[in-house]
Amino acid sequence: MLKALIGAAVVVVLAALSKTRNYYIAGLVPLFPTFALIAHYIVGKSRSLDDLKTTIAFGMWSIIPYFVYLAALYLLVDRFRLELSLAMAALAWLVAATLLVTVWVRLH
């Protein structure tokens, strides 16, 4: 129930921000590291410090698929409907994330 309320609150904040003069800040709100905090706490409590640092390093590299998503969406919104652009950008993220994991596994 608490997770649903937090999710709903985030949606309300995003909707409110999108109507303000600083609408672009709505792009920052979803990047608050809620799940990263949870993941780092769990890994930090259940694994070694080296494992935690590896998780953090991988998290830093995970910015690449998000950037690919944003770049794809930026380029696609002028050419396609919003829904199709979002779907294609999500697919671009999936491809980039798959490549990241594949390369990471081979190097580590």
Image (spheres, rainbow, N blue to C red):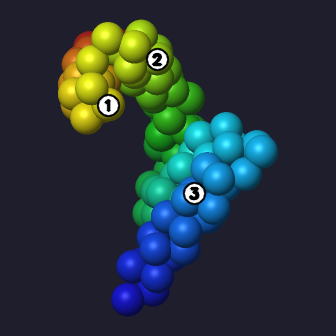
What amino acid is labelled 1 in the image?
Leu
N-terminal of the pair, mark 3 or mark 2, is: 3
Is residue 99 visible from the viewing direction of this image?
yes
Q: Is residue 10 left or right of residue 99?
A: right
Vertical side of 47 occupied by 53: above or below = above
- x then y, percent, for residue 36: 52, 52
At mark 1, the secondary structure is helix
- Badge 3 local density, few (<14 within 10 Å), some, or many (20+)? some
Distance from disc 1 to disc 3, alpha carbons, whole Å, reads 18 Å
- x then y, percent, for residue 19: 65, 53
What amino acid is labelled 3 in the image?
Leu
Could you tell me which residue is drawn at 50 percent across and 35 percent down? 59
- x then y, percent, for residue 72: 38, 15
Distance from disc 1 to disc 2, alpha carbons, whole Å, reads 11 Å
Residue placed most toward the observer, 87 or 42: 87
Could you tell me which residue is drawn at 68 percent across and 44 percent down? 23
Could you tell me which residue is drawn at 46 percent across and 74 percent down? 8
- Residue positioned most to the right: 21
At mark 3, the secondary structure is helix
N-terminal of the pair, mark 1 or mark 2, is: 2
Q: Is residue 32 left or right of residue 66?
A: right
Q: Which mark is residue 24?
A: none
Tell me the quadrant of the picture where the C terminus can be found.
Answer: top left
- Badge 1 local density, few (<14 within 10 Å), some, or many (20+)? few
| Viewer-nearest of discs 1 and 3 | 1
What amino acid is labelled 2 in the image?
Tyr
Where is mark 1, residue-wise? 82
| Viewer-nearest of discs 1 and 2 | 1
Where is mark 3, residue-wise? 14
